[in-house]
Image (spheres, helix red, strand yellow):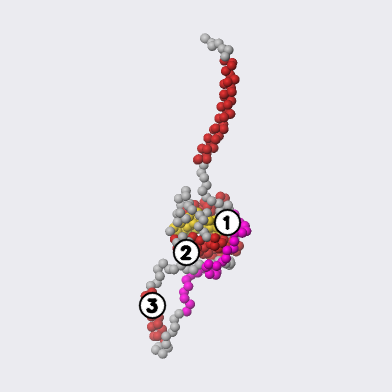
Amino acid sequence: MRVRRRQAGDTDRWPIVVGLAFAIATAMPSWVVNRTVIAAGLQAPVSTLPELTQPVNDFARVIDDSSSAVLDQMIRSLKDASGDVVVIATVPTIAPYGDIREYANKLFENHGRGIGEKGKDNGLLLLLAVNERTVRIEVGYALEQWVTDGFSGETSRRYMLPQFTDGNYGAGLRIGTARIVTRIAAGRNVVLQGVPRVAEPQSETPIPVSALIVLFIAILVLSRIGRGPRAGVRRWGGNPWSGWSSGVGSFGGGGGGGFGGGFGGFGGGRSGGGGGGASW
């Protein structure tokens, strides 16, 4: 067998080979790490959910200052009276979520600091998505007995949507919040201070004027028949029907109440999955 004899120049090349290997070994980890970090950054999911920190979280910037103050005051009034927590959030969009119910449920969790108290689940989220033109009331389990799916849907459709359609987001949220906190207060048997009354909206199918005239004439005729010709005509009237209303005081009052002081409404409560909403 033929064996290659070691040449004199072989020994001289070893320092070059060792130095080159050392340089590559030193530079390679930094390059690999940087490449890995960049790739992970591109692939890692980015949270699109904002953090709720106060009673009124106007991320979409659509609530006027006056309405924000009234909303804050109503929410704090309920919390002081019953311990229940209502939180309002407006967002420009729910993207990349495709369903506002899923978005509201996740937002309710608030990165581990859910609305309401842990174990009591006495929180409620009123969410407005501006681009999607949708509102959603997400209810904690303890409040579902009063803020039912039907009540949530009616409050959204009949009370808030007429204001939202005209771009009056602050006014719509004031009406909806007043109705919600009043409902909870009635269920808890507590009295709220400075919460405006919510008047019954105009009926979608008003009684025709002609029908009212016929009814009025019929009552006059029956009154004459019943009392005889000398009894005269009895004046019909009395207090007008004012419709259903709830709350205390007249809408538009209540004062600001300010945004000072700790709120403490994020104690790890969970949504019960109930609620309702509407789109316009």
Q: Residue at x 46, y 62 (%)?
A: 163
Query: Which of these two is toward me, 211 or 123?
Result: 211
Tell me the SS state at disc 3. helix
Which residue is under mark 1?
54
Tell me the SS state at disc 1. loop
| Label 2 with label 1: CB-CB less than 8 Å | no
Q: Quadrant of the C terminus?
A: bottom left
Amino acid beneath label 1: Gln
Q: How many marks?
A: 3
Q: Residue at x 50, y 67 (%)?
A: 198
Q: Quadrant of residue 24?
A: top right
Disc 2 versus disc 1: distance between alpha carbons?
24 Å
Q: Residue at x 47, y 48 (%)?
A: 96
Amino acid beneath label 3: Ile
Q: Residues within 10 Å of mark 3 (few under 14, many from 20)?
A: few
Which of the marked residues, 3 or 2, is nearer the chain's N terminus? 2
Query: Which of these two is toward me, 261 or 188?
Result: 261
- Position of residue 196 measured from the top left corner of the image (x, y, whole percent): 54, 67
Which of the marked residues, 1 or 3, is nearer the chain's N terminus? 1
Please check the rendered image and state whether residue 243 is part of the magenta-colored stretch, yes or no: yes
> Which of the labelled discs sits on residue 159, or is there none?
2
Q: Residues within 10 Å of mark 2 (few under 14, many from 20)?
A: many
8, above or below 181, in the image: above
156, above or below 22, in the image: below
Tell me the SS state at disc 2. helix
Which of the marked residues, 2 or 1, is nearer the chain's N terminus? 1
Q: Nearer the viewer, mark 1 or mark 3?
A: 1
> Which of the labelled discs sits on residue 213, or is there none?
3
